């Protein structure tokens, strides 16, 4: 049986980045760093039988063991691809105002396997931290492009203050921009396509071009009714906080804060992506133990089925995976007594939520 393994993180420079991530990872750099990629198919396995290989190579070598049932959604032209990307973001300045395509547009127009849906969990936030999330007023493609060109687009966005613990989801088509002063965990489809609509007056240097026609083609022009997600508790154990904080057809994301051993299950459906926010301990699986420390990221293959988070010091852990929305999200939360509307909002605005769409489709045949 394949064992859980850790990956070597990759720090990525960005014009809007700073020195927070290099300091946290103990990797000095002369460039401003915006992102730390924690789990991605390009990263190198640190330990175990696959040490030295990329996650992409592991995916090709053992697709069923690694991905389980989710393999059916991770085949691209018959080739298995690892479907998710987990990262940390720590901006010193505003990211561009941007929008991402869905699967259909990305495959037809960009020739890549996935579009980009992403969810953010705020780990740390300074008092003035904000995100632009969706349009504040209905626009048309022509008015969007005109506003992007004359610099007025920034005044046409909805701005949301961020505090530690806040979560939101950027569905494809949602115009958004992240501001400075936050440390975020992001889980997303394994796609790095970003259509920039406005870049706060930065010069259009190499790698910072605008993509107005593509962005206008994929934008959702209706303002959102909901921005922040209300996480839902999955545990009634005393002293344990276990919440589902985002869900869509591409990923589900949990946060577990526990001082005691806590069992988890892949059920053979998907690999589990684990990132340690705080605390120390071990991950136990099939008689083996893997050390866990802050900022460590672990892939638990689907074939492991059952594993356990065992703290030696109270742990704060993020767990993401590709869900079966009914079996992994809707039915368990209904069993805990949650109403459908509360479950649906895990996907963000109900008009765009994959979870609410699944519930609504089942109710109306």
Image: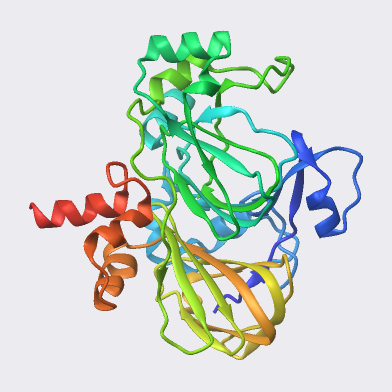
The reply to whether residue 249 is in sight is no
The reply to whether residue 70 is in sight is yes
Q: Nearer the viewer, residue 190 or 229?
A: 229
Decide if residue 185 is on the left or right side of residue 73: right
Query: Looking at the picture, does residue 346 appear above or below residue 94?
Result: below
Q: Which residue is drawn at 8% across and 52% down?
A: 364
Q: Which of 112 and 216 is in front in this view?
A: 216
Query: Looking at the picture, does residue 211 appear above or below residue 330?
Result: above
- Quarter of the image for the N terminus: give it: bottom right
Decide if residue 142 is on the left or right side of residue 264: left
Residue sticking out furthest to the front:
127
x, y percentage for residue 32? 82, 38
Decide if residue 270 is on the left or right side of residue 86: left
Query: Looking at the picture, does residue 90 appear above or below residue 97?
Result: below
Q: Nearer the viewer, residue 24 or 80?
A: 24
Q: Residue at x 90, y 45 (%)?
A: 29
Q: Residue at x 58, y 37 (%)?
A: 192
């Amino acid at each position: 049986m394949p064992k859980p393994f850790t990956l070597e993180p990759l720090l990525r420079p960005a014009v809007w980045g700073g020195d927070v991530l290099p300091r946290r990872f103990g990797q000095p750099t002369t460039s401003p760093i915006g992102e730390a990629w924690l789990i991605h198919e390009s990263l190198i396995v640190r330990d175990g039988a696959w040490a030295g290989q990329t996650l992409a190579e592991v995916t090709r070598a053992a697709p069923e063991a690694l991905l389980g049932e989710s393999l059916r959604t991770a085949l691209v032209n018959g080739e298995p691809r690892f479907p998710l990307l987990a990262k940390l973001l720590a901006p010193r300045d505003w990211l561009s105002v941007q929008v991402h395509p869905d699967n259909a547009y990305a495959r037809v127009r960009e020739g890549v396997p996935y579009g980009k849906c992403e969810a953010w969990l705020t780990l740390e936030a300074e008092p003035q931290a904000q995100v632009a999330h969706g349009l504040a007023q209905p626009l048309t493609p022509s008015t969007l492009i005109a506003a992007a060109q004359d610099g007025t687009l920034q005044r046409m966005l909805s701005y949301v203050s961020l505090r530690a613990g806040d979560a939101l989801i950027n569905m494809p088509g949602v115009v958004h921009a992240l501001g400075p002063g936050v440390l975020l965990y992001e889980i997303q489809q394994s796609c790095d396509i970003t259509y920039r609509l406005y870049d706060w007056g930065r010069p259009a240097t190499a790698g910072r071009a605008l993509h107005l026609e593509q962005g206008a083609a994929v934008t959702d022009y209706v303002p959102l009714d909901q921005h922040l997600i209300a996480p839902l508790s999955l545990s009634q154990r005393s002293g344990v906080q276990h919440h589902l904080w985002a869900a869509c057809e591409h990923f589900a994301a949990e946060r577990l804060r526990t001082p005691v051993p806590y069992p988890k299950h892949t059920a053979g459906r998907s690999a589990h992506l684990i990132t340690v926010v705080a605390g120390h301990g071990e991950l136990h699986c099939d008689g083996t133990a893997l050390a866990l420390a802050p900022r460590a990221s672990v892939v638990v293959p689907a074939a492991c089925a059952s594993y356990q988070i065992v703290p030696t010091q109270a742990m704060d852990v993020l767990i993401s995976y590709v869900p079966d929305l009914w079996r992994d999200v809707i039915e368990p939360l209904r069993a805990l007594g949650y109403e459908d509307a509360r479950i649906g909002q895990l996907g963000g605005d109900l008009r765009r939520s994959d979870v609410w769409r699944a519930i609504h489709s089942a109710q109306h045949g």
